[in-house]
Image (tube, rainbow, N blue to C red):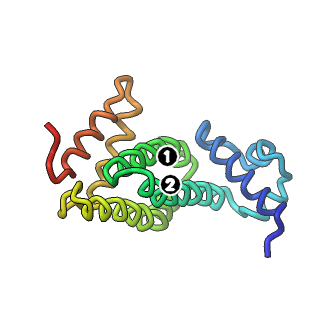
């Protein structure tokens, strides 16, 4: 059983690393330890390499995003839940861009392999709820939707943020009866 202070240290490290890598992908492990308020030994006990830390930060972010689906579906109609969830995903993708600067090509592949399935499963849950209530087309594909969200985060970083309009168009394409 992991001690509560060890869990708290790990959580603080992940928060500090997420913030630091988002600001500057070249942040050192020592800078992360200082920011988290832990010693270097504590950091390296939890994350033996920089790559392990970046991967853990990314995995933590994906788990957080995926974990919001049941609550959104309990509170909102499926199409609105999908909108809110996608906005959160796009924000996370923007933050992830800073994390990506901290990784090499092999780690990028590992991230994709670890996170693609859970993200597509979350989208599928949202789609299934919408298909069940008749708001989302039966042929909607979670993998295609995920690819389209990649364009959203890139659009959101431009001076004229086109992401909200692009999301409207994507969601309109999912509807059984497109809005006019």
Expressed as whole percent of the image width and height from the top left, the position of residue 22 reads: 58, 41
Does dot 1 land on a helix, a strand or a loop? helix
Is residue 30 left or right of 66 when viewed as pictured?
Answer: right
Picture quarter with the C terminus:
top left
Percent x, y for residue 6?
Answer: 81, 63
2 or 1: tag closer to the N-terminus: 2
Q: Nearer the viewer, residue 78 or 116?
A: 78
Q: Residue at x 66, y 57 (%)?
A: 53
Which of the two residues, 120 or 110, is positioned nearer the viewer here?
A: 120
Residue that carries the numbered disc 1 in the rendered image: 92
Query: Quarter of the image holding residue 144?
Result: bottom left
User: Dot 1 surroundings within 10 Å: few (below 14), some, or many (20 or more)?
Assistant: some
The residue shown at (22%, 40%) is: 169
Q: Secondary structure at mark 2?
A: helix
Q: Please tell me which residue is depicted at 28% across the width and 33% down the height of the picture.
A: 165
- Residue 85, can we see it? yes
Q: Residue 146 has which mark?
A: none
Q: Position of residue 96 (x, y in %)?
A: 51, 47
The answer to whether residue 105 shows anywhere in this view is no
Q: Given the current orientation, which residue lies at the most extreme bottom position?
A: 1
Q: Residues within 10 Å of mark 2 (few under 14, many from 20)?
A: some
Query: Picture coordinates of residue 156 (x, y %)?
Result: 39, 34
The numbered mark at residue 65 is 2
Residue at far top of view: 159
Q: Is residue 19 above or below residue 135?
A: above
Q: Nearer the viewer, mark 2 or mark 1?
A: 2
175 or 45, nearer to the observer: 175
Quadrant including the N terminus = bottom right
Residue drawn where x is 83% and y is 46% of the image:
37
């Amino acid at each position: 059983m992991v001690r509560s202070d060890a869990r708290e240290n790990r959580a603080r490290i992940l928060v500090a690393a997420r913030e630091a890598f988002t600001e500057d992908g070249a942040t050192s492990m020592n800078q992360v330890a200082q920011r988290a308020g832990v010693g270097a030994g504590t950091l390296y006990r939890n994350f033996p390499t920089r790559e392990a830390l970046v991967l853990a930060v990314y995995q933590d972010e994906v788990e957080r995003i995926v974990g919001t689906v049941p609550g959104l579906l309990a509170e909102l109609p499926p199409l609105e839940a999908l909108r809110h969830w996608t906005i959160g995903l796009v924000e996370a993708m923007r933050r992830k861009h800073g994390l990506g600067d901290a990784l090499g090509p092999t780690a990028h592949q590992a991230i994709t392999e670890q996170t693609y399935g859970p993200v597509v499963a979350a989208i599928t849950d949202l789609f299934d709820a919408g298909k069940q209530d008749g708001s989302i087309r039966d042929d909607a594909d979670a993998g295609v939707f995920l690819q389209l969200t990649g364009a959203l985060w890139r659009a959101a970083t431009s001076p004229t943020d086109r992401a909200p309009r692009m999301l409207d168009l994507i969601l309109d394409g999912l509807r059984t009866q497109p809005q006019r």
